[in-house]
Image: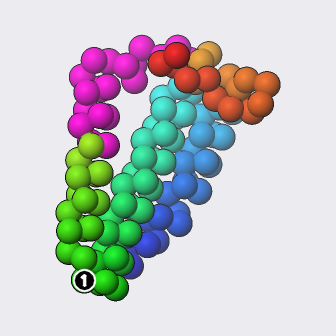
Amino acid sequence: MITALSVVVMPLLSLAERRAGRELGSATAVADSKQTLICSYISAAVLIGLVVNATFGWWWVDAIAGLVIAAFAVREGLEAWRGDACATSVGMLLEDDEDGHEHDPHT
């Protein structure tokens, strides 16, 4: 129940946090909104694994969902270790390009 609620609520929270961060000019809040969105992806992976396991009895799908979560965790940990999250300038996080998409600080 909590995982399903998280899949619904976390993207909305991320959007609100991103908007507030932009309005306040806070790169930290905008970056945190991205982490919140990643949490919703992780919740979705868990939910899919649980539903498929319960519906079809495919226990291994739950294990694959765990591997997806581990991959996200390793990627985020490596980026944090290298300081990638901190190296992004405020302007790059807060600006939109002409299409309304955020700039990718890694390109």
The residue to which callout 1 is attached is 57
- In the rendered view, does 55 fall on the left or right side of 33? left
Q: Nearer the viewer, residue 28 or 64?
A: 64
Looking at the rendered structure, the secondary structure element under dot 1 is loop
* Looking at the image, residue 103 lies above or below residue 15: above
Residue 87 falls inside the magenta stretch: yes
Q: Amino acid at mark 1?
A: Gly
User: Could one spot residue 74 in this view of the protein?
Assistant: yes
Q: Quadrant of the N terminus?
A: bottom left
Q: Position of residue 39 (x, y in %)?
A: 40, 51
Horizontal and vertical percent position of residue 43 = 38, 61
Label 1 crowd bin: few (<14), some (14–19), many (20+), radius 10 Å? few
Q: How many marks?
A: 1
Q: Image point 32% across, 65% down: which residue?
A: 46
| Residue drawn 29% across the image and 51% down it | 68
Predominant SS of the magenta segment: helix
Q: Is residue 62 above or below residue 15?
A: below
Q: Nearer the viewer, residue 9 or 78?
A: 78
Q: Residue at x 20, y 68 (%)?
A: 60
Residue sticking out furthest to the right: 98
Query: Residue 34 location, x and y as percent?
Result: 49, 39
The boundaries of the magenta stretch are 72-90
Residue 44, quarter of the rendered image: bottom left
**Left or right: 62, with 48 as reference point:** left
Q: Position of residue 40 (x, y in %)?
A: 44, 56
Task: Residue at 60%, 34% (x, y): give it.
Answer: 21
From the viewer's perspective, tell me whether residue 54 is left or right of residue 41.
left
State whether residue 18 is above or below residue 79.
below
